[in-house]
Amino acid sequence: MNTSINLFTKCPYTGNPKTRLSSFFTKSERTFISEYLLTSIIDEVSELSLNNISRNIHVYPDVSQRFVNSFKNLNDFNLIRQRGRNLNMRMLNCIKEQAQQARKVLLFGSDIPGLTSEIIEDGLIRLDSHDAVIGPATDGGYYLIGFKDFHEKYTHSINLKPENIRSSLSNNKLIFSELEQLSDIDCPNDLLII
């Protein structure tokens, strides 16, 4: 396999989804928002017409039966439980494991309403001539990270925290490109700009 597409998400039915929206929405409303966003990005990833591609959904804390029953198109995806004590480690574990099977690895979240199959494909194309690609978010973070030929040594030297990502890539002498800026949905104000 040449390409690994990885969607990171929390299971909307376990725990407390979208907690930063809890002062604005009830739990059932936040579950609905999570379901809607996840359905939308699953549909976009399903539209990718690339050969030799693996589509994966990495779920935290785990995949529930309701998750499996709620989303169409899951037959095109491998469902994988996220592993690691924090988000940075879970993301690095995903990238490292997928890089053992694929030359290009893209990882993105499920809360970016503007993320399309075209933008995902643009990220993959940029990896033809760059070591890494970032999709910057309007809040200063990023919605997508991708690597070509990710080496295991980067697991200990790259910090994926938003405030460190650019300097971390540069310190590892990785040439990176940035995609268009998009908004993610983390807090109530984010809903006003989509």
Image (tube, rainbow, N blue to C red):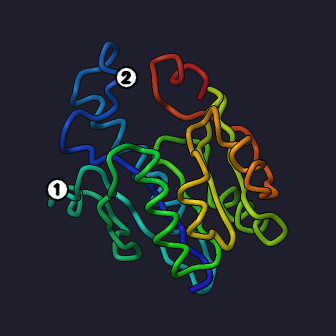
Front residue of this view, candidates 54 and 66: 54
Q: Which label number is shown at residue 122?
A: none
The residue tagged 1 is: 66
Determine the secondary structure under disc 2.
Answer: helix
The extreme left residue here reads: 65
Q: Is 74 drawn above or below residue 190 in the view shown? A: below
Closer to the N terminus: mark 2 or mark 1?
Answer: 2
Disc 2 to disc 1, C-alpha distance: 23 Å
Q: Amino acid at mark 2?
A: Arg
Residue 11 position in % (x across, y down): 27, 48
User: In the picture shown, does residue 71 fall above or below 30?
Assistant: below
Name which residue lies at 16% across and 56% down.
66
x, y (%) of residue 181? 72, 38
Tell me the quarter of the picture where residue 4 sits: bottom right
Tell which of 83 and 79 is nearer to you: 83
**Which amino acid lies under the numbered mark 1 shown in the image of this protein?**
Arg
Name the residue beneath numbered marker 2. Answer: 20
Q: Quadrant of the N terminus?
A: bottom right
Q: Residues within 10 Å of mark 1 (few under 14, many from 20)?
A: few
